[in-house]
Amino acid sequence: MAGPSTFMAQAMVNHLMRYGTTPYTLTPTWKMKLWTSNPDFDAGTGGTQLTGNGYVALGANITMAASAWNAATTVTNGQGVTNSGTLATWTAAAADWSGPITGASVMDASANLMWGAVLDNARTVGNGDTFRFSASACDLNLDRVTAAGMSNFWKAEVLDHFTCTDRTYAPANPCYMALFTSAPNFQTGAGGTEVTVANNYARMSMALSGAIWDAADANGNVDNTAEITFSACSGTAWGTIIGAALFSASTAGTMFCGNSFTGQAIGLGDTFKIAAGAFDVSVV
């Protein structure tokens, strides 16, 4: 399995960016649906679910716990988790199922589609067969590259949180916004040149709450609700600002997420501002 639905992307980004206001309440058990005609896995609508002959809709429990899922690891362009053992076993088919099965999705307790994907190979289930996912067959990956993206660190933490392999993480709150004159790698947090801590520059404290960040929109993006204004440059020019990122600490720390900007030169007396809605954070 591959991508989160819009519903889940919204829940993930709200959990992190608005942690002080709307932390996500974990659902310890999910359910799975099998599809013979796939729905829109982003919107969670449409599709034709398998029916009859022993198939039970939402009948396969999926435990969201460390016993069922491996901890997040690095995948191309992001982070991912896999199931550690056999997952979602149905009872044996009482007769041939109406397949072939072309896709699968997992749902929360309120039947919201959380994650879904097209199967690598369509599957036909005959009389007496038992349908299941073997170990590592389900990949839940956050691996899309975006200009307004979460770092690999945050992707790993949110995946571990939602699969319950590690419920201990809470983001540093407040976090701190840093400005860059050459961009770091917003996925790994490596590299880049931050504005020198002098000349009235310091990282800005930013609460992770609804007071500063909008609720996730229909595309799973969170924006700043008001203009972000740094202190005016004094002394030596800061240089041309081309990016900003949120960190866990006022100096050093772990990168949470970042944005690239059109370069803005900041000289003596200039004030760097990020307009309301201009700093975007997306989980995918």
Image (tube, rainbow, N blue to C red):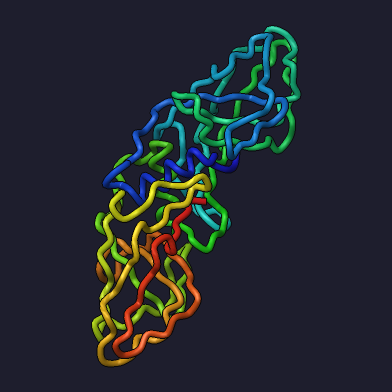
In the rendered image, residue 144, in percent from the top left (x then y), is placed at 57, 54
Look at the image and tell me in which quarter the N terminus lies. top right
Q: Residue at x 48, y 59 (%)?
A: 149
In the rendered image, residue 8, in percent from the top left (x then y), is placed at 48, 39
- Does residue 70 lie above or below 98 as drawn? below
Residue 89 left/right relative to 282: right
- Does residue 81 lie above or below 100 as drawn? below
In the rendered image, residue 60, in percent from the top left (x then y), is placed at 54, 20
Question: Is 19 in front, or is 252?
Answer: 19
Residue 220 left/right relative to 41: left
Q: How many marks?
A: 0
- Does residue 244 lie above or below 137 as drawn? below
- Does residue 198 lie above or below 48 as drawn? below
Q: Residue at x 55, y 25 (%)?
A: 32
Residue positioned most to the bottom: 236
Residue 92 left/right relative to 152: right
Which quadrant of the structure image shows residue 239? Answer: bottom left
Q: Residue at x 43, y 47 (%)?
A: 216
Question: Is 100 in front, or is 93?
Answer: 100
In the rendered image, residue 192, in percent from the top left (x then y), is placed at 43, 76
